[in-house]
Amino acid sequence: MKVAALFAAFAVSANAFAPTSSFTNSVSLSAAPRSASALQMNAAERTYIMIKPDGVQRGIVGNIISRFETKGYKLVAMKTKQASQELLDTHYCDLVEKPFFPKLRDYMMSGPVCCMVWEGKEAVVTGRKMLGATNPLASEPGTIRGDFCIEVGRNICHGSDSVENANKEIALWFEESELVDWESHSKDWIYE
Ligand code: RTP
Ligand code: MG
């Protein structure tokens, strides 16, 4: 009997130190302005991040992955790929009429790209902040472009600019079966 009581007491105290379940508890314990489903949707937001051929050639892939990992985002898919002209025409469909587009397409086809899907709360807008401004000379130090490049035509990494475009780009570059739905063991240490 004494052993059982001791075990029960230990279970209660151990529970006090355990991280709480992220989404359900944060919604029920606080007067959060968003609904549980909105919070869950937000935490599952996905962005398409693509390291361009210069980033791959210069060996910056690991550093960029590390930034997204250590921020707390979850890697849902990753692969290297040689982009085709058709794929790039679709991906940059809003830029095909721009005078710089032929150069952009040649640059993007000059070697393999590294395609990734990262998931987490506000992944799209935060991914863009982590990338920095399109022109690397205008990018803040500490951002990917601010730290690693100089020219707009060699700006090493792409990031989706809206949730809508992220979903389109993910569907363009990945098969549905390549997106892995998994639960991070760190989630309760990243989200309250
Ligand atoms: P990205 O799509 O690659 O993430 O870049 P972004 O949103 O910051 O910029 P966007 O306007 O979408 O331009 C796409 C890429 O085209 C090249 N660019 N060159 N020469 C130029 O004036 C010029 N402007 C844009 C850059 O590589 C830019 O990232
Ligand atoms: Mg863009």
Image (cartoon, helix red, strand yellow):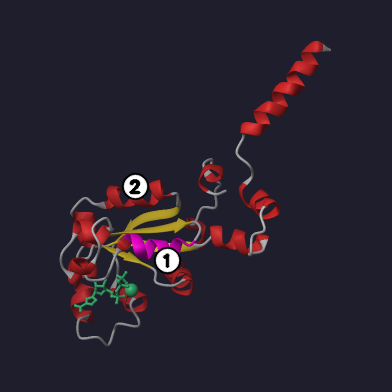
Q: Is residue 89 magenta?
A: no
Tell me residue 49's x, y (percent).
Answer: 37, 61
Residue 30 vs residue 184, the one in the foreground: 30
Tell me residue 111's x, y (percent).
Answer: 21, 62
Q: Is residue 127 magenta?
A: yes
Residue reaching furthest to the right: 1
Residue at 31% x, 62% y is 131
Q: Is residue 41 above or below residue 191?
A: below
Q: Looking at the rendering, in which quadrant would you find the N terminus?
A: top right
Q: Is residue 4 left or right of residue 96?
A: right
Residue 59 vs residue 186, the one in the foreground: 186
What's drawn in magenta, residue-wise?
122-130
Amino acid type, label 1: Val
Q: Residue 170, located in which quarter of the rendered image?
A: bottom left
**Structural distance between the alpha carbons of marks 1 and 2:** 18 Å
Nearer to us: label 1 or label 2: 1
Residue at 20% x, 81% y is 100
Q: Is residue 152 above or below residue 141?
A: below
Q: For mark 1, what is the residue?
A: 125
For the question of whether residue 118 can be seen, the reply is: yes
Amino acid type, label 2: Ser
Q: For mark 2, what is the residue?
A: 66
Mark 1 closeness class: few <14, some 14–19, many ≥20 residues within 10 Å: some
